Amino acid sequence: MEVVIVPDAKAGGELIAEAMAALVRRKPDALLGVATGSTPLPIYEALTAKVREGEVDASRARICQLDEYVGLPAGHPESYRSVVLREVVEPLGLSESAFMGPDGSAEDVQGACEAYDRALAEAGGVDLQLLGIGTDGHIGFNEPCSSLASRTRIKTLTEQTRVDNARFFEGDIEQVPHHVITQGIGTILEARHLVLLATGEGKADAVAATVEGPVASVVPASALQLHPHATVVVDEAAASKLKLAEYFRHTYANKPAWQGL
Ligand code: PGA
């Protein structure tokens, strides 16, 4: 995998937004898989700015969701459907019809998971999937020891993830759902390009285990090592525990400019 060390979150957002814009210029109806949480917000800000400034026409782009809470009432502001509509779909000027996500309020949750996997395949597959990483190494909501071949399914959140996400629920862990739907690791690995952004010291251990540790389900993000086109963008703080940081810097500095991410 390629590791790119950037000075800060804003620079990471700009770099990834440019890669997304380049993809959309090549393939106007690209299916862009987006992630929630705080980390990707600079990406969405930078991409929205590019659209508003006319650097890229994203009017035919399609957006799909990585994961979703189970059991929040429809329209709950912290459901990931609401978050993605608010942070990505609306700012880019897209309509809701350009957006796909799993139905977290379905009575038949397992059926909704299988339907979402089918819908992604029928849409031609994800062209670029953005990922964050949990402090426990999760991608999407694939918590430690998720099967590396898993498909979209229901998962139970770890206590750590519920603590981490309580800030979106007035700091009250009791309001954070226990269950989620997440694209499986096997599903995620089918995207044509995986781009993981990690910022802040709190992610440094998870990043080191992902990049330099063995492929192991106990660190779900380490599955990126199995993907032929995976890019890990980290700020200095998140890179602080990488033993090979100098090598990564050297490699990226000497990459041909035309290659992009
Ligand atoms: P964060 O979440 O960007 O809010 O840190 C990342 C994740 O849990 O995947």
Image (cartoon, rainbow, N blue to C red):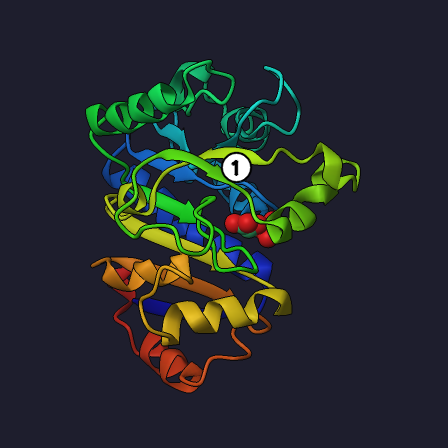
Would residue 175 be found to the left or right of residue 1 on screen?
right
Q: Is residue 235 visible?
A: no
Q: Nearer the viewer, residue 34 or 27?
A: 34
The amino acid on which the numbered mark 1 sits, given as a three-letter code, is Thr
The residue tagged with tag 1: helix, strand or loop? helix
Q: Percent from the top left, x then y, of residue 143?
A: 47, 50
Residue 45 image-quadrant placement: top right
Can you say which quadrant of the picture contains the C terminus?
bottom left
Label 1 crowd (10 A; few <14 / some 14-19 / many >=20): many
Q: Which residue is the site of mark 1?
A: 48
Q: Percent from the top left, x then y, of residue 104?
A: 49, 23
Q: Residue at x 28, y 64 (%)?
A: 225
Can you say which quadrant of the picture contains the N terminus?
bottom left
From the viewer's perspective, is residue 23 above or below residue 122?
Answer: below
Residue 214 image-quadrant placement: bottom left
Q: Residue at x 64, y 45 (%)?
A: 162
Q: Percent from the top left, x then y, of residue 38?
A: 62, 47
Q: Residue at x 71, y 43 (%)?
A: 166
